[in-house]
Image: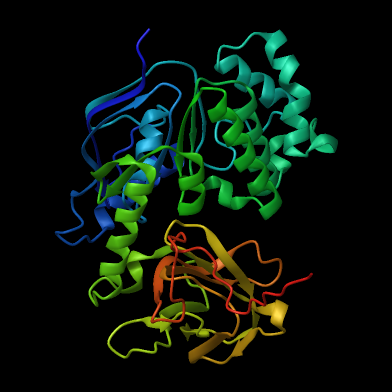
Amino acid sequence: MTDVAISARGLAKRYTIGVQRDPYGRLTEVLWSSLARPFRRKSAAQRGAEFWALRDLSFDVQRGTAIGVIGRNGAGKSTLLKILSRITEPTLGRAELQGRVGSLLEVGTGFHNELTGRENISLSGAILGMKRTDITRRFDEIVAFADIGPFIDTPVKRYSSGMKVRLGFAVAAFLEPEILLIDEVLAVGDAAFQRKSIGRIEDVTNEGRTVMFVSHDLGAVANLTQTCLYLESGRLKQLGPTREVVHAYQMDGLLARDDPGRGLSFYRRSEVPGAPVRITSIAAVSTRPERATIDLGSPLEIDIGIDVTTPIERLPIDVTIKDQRGRTVAILFSPDQGFTLTSSRGTASIHLRIEDLPLAPGTYFVDVGLNQSPPHTTAFDVILDFPIVEVENSGQVVQWLERPWGSLQPQRVDWRRSA
């Protein structure tokens, strides 16, 4: 048996913008498209405009490997997983997968809305080619992990998005697929579920199964995967050891920070259309005017610019600070400090000062989110992995003693002899 679990050769996917070409679309959509066509006025750019989501993508994934897939929005990550999951066909090239494939790409992927949770578990197992005895053996674990016990015999169409994603992940992870494909859908769940899911992914990889993990969480990618695939504009930019690829991705982010043509769009993960607020700028207050740098032990101050298009009350803001390996250093949620934004239309500027965050030398990044309130489960606008500041040791620590860069270095340390 070959050691290659996933093989892609020359994969390319083309979409046509502004033109309905799906002969298997819903009947109402097809009829409406046909009736309305004579009355549409389209620009030349819209008529038959083509968009290549993937171009000439080739790679191999060895059996038992956990591989991460990273890249900005629109890089082609989700398109790649849809092709590997056989949800869509490539325009060019081919992809071969050796073994049973489980995937979690969108909330409720593969579920039949009219069937109950119990029936969907059985259906998913049958599709994976599992025996009824094997499905029954894992059934209780799936229900316990998804935490939907009282609703297991309720039709899935009545589930919340959180319930669907919990059940979907549990089915994908516990029904023993040989290849597991996971998209950013885990971000839909709450923090406790995300931690539990990360633990389950670790278990799957330790069991020797193949995992392809798409995420904007570089810390999770670095911790869970050994190999990483970096996509940019549908092309393979880099494939190699995860830490090397994540570092290259972050360095590209540093260059983009200073490129006015790219602005925050390079870092924007998601944005609600028509949202009342939008992030327009993020900057650190620097001790050196020529670049975003602070001295070891200095307070960290961050200015966040916001555009307010509709008057808003009590807007929560969250800021996550991460080191150059993607590890979370601090999470700050403005209501914890008694602050939320209330603003009329126009612009607003938020100033955040952190007095005692002992950052070691290195590069630091921030995630900034403008949250809907309550229940804070969806954000109006999210910026990820924005390179905010360089911390420099300008003699405050005389001997660095090969301490790992990016780790916390407390400044207020008291040494005493006890006896």
Q: Is residue 114 above or below residue 246?
A: above
Q: In this view, does 391 lie above or below 169?
A: below
Q: Name the residue furthest front.
A: 419
User: x, y percentage for residue 144?
Assistant: 78, 33
Q: For the point 44% across and 56% down, which residue is it? A: 325
Q: For the point 70% across and 36% down, which residue is it? A: 156
User: x, y percentage for residue 318?
Assistant: 59, 72
Q: Can residue 324 be seen in this view?
A: yes
Q: For the point 64% across and 76% down, which residue is it? A: 413
User: x, y percentage for residue 193?
Assistant: 68, 47
Of 48 and 347, the residue lying toward us: 347
Residue 211 left/right relative to 24: right
Q: For the point 59% across and 68% down, which residue is it? A: 330
Q: Can residue 217 be seen in this view?
A: no
Residue 342 left/right relative to 100: right
User: x, y percentage for residue 131?
Assistant: 64, 8
Of 221 and 338, the residue lying toward us: 221
Q: In this view, does 302 lie above or below 169?
A: below
Of 150 and 69, the residue lying toward us: 69
Residue 230 left/right relative to 326: left
